[in-house]
Amino acid sequence: MLWWIWVLLGFFLLLLELLTPGGLYLLFFGISGLAVGFLTGIRLSGPLWTQWLLFSILSVLSLLLFRKPLLQRFRVKEHPTEVDSMVGESAVTLDEIATGAIGKVELRGSTWNARNVGENILSRGQRCKVEKVEGLMFWVRGQ
């Protein structure tokens, strides 16, 4: 095969890697295609079957050696969300909230939507306890 076909194949595989969600598989096949294209260009790759064999060996070997360290290096570290830690804290109602209804509460200087899951009506300014956090909604009960 001509050297420039290997180079085009390598760049095409690298482009596909950029367009697909991070698996880092096609990256190694694209780099191997570029390497075989370079070797073919300087006439060190041999006949077509040797080029394909070289491409396969380089791809699989680089995949096995370098994929895992690259994934670990670029892994996004997850941080615990602060909202989950608000369960059990005390909030102050900003509205009167009937049983089962939704209103506003203040906690840590911010206003939040809250659902009254208690048996009693929560009056304005009353302290309530956060029982559960679901998305941006607090489930509260009177103290």
Image: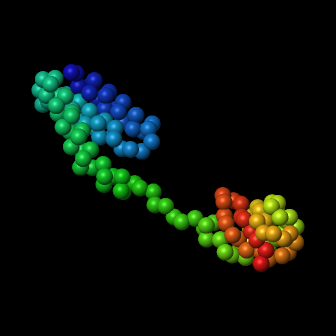
Position of the N terminus, as image quadrant, is top left
Residue ID at (41%, 55%): 75
Which residue is rendered at x = 38% and y = 44% of the image? Answer: 23
x, y percent for residue 69: 30, 54
| Residue sitting nearer the eye, 54 or 7 | 54
Task: Note whether residue 56 is visible.
Answer: yes
The furthest residue to the top: 1
- Quadrant of the image occupied by residue 14: top left
Give the tally of numbered discs: 0
Residue shown at 79% from the left, 65% from the top:
116
Vertical position of residue 85 compared to residue 37: above or below: below
Report x, y in % for residue 44. 12, 31
Q: Is residue 139 left or right of residue 3?
A: right
In which quadrant of the rendered image does the C terminus lie? bottom right
* Image quarter of residue 15: top left
Residue 74 is situated, as x and y percent measured from the top left of the image, at: 40, 54
Residue 105 shows in this picture: no
Location of residue 118 by image quarter: bottom right
- What is the image's colouring? rainbow
Q: Residue at x 49, y 61 (%)?
A: 78
Relative to 78, residue 70 above or below: above
For residue 34, side relative to residue 92 (left or right)? left
Judging depth in this view, the residue of 108 and 115 nearest the camera is 115
Foreground residue among 60 and 128:
128
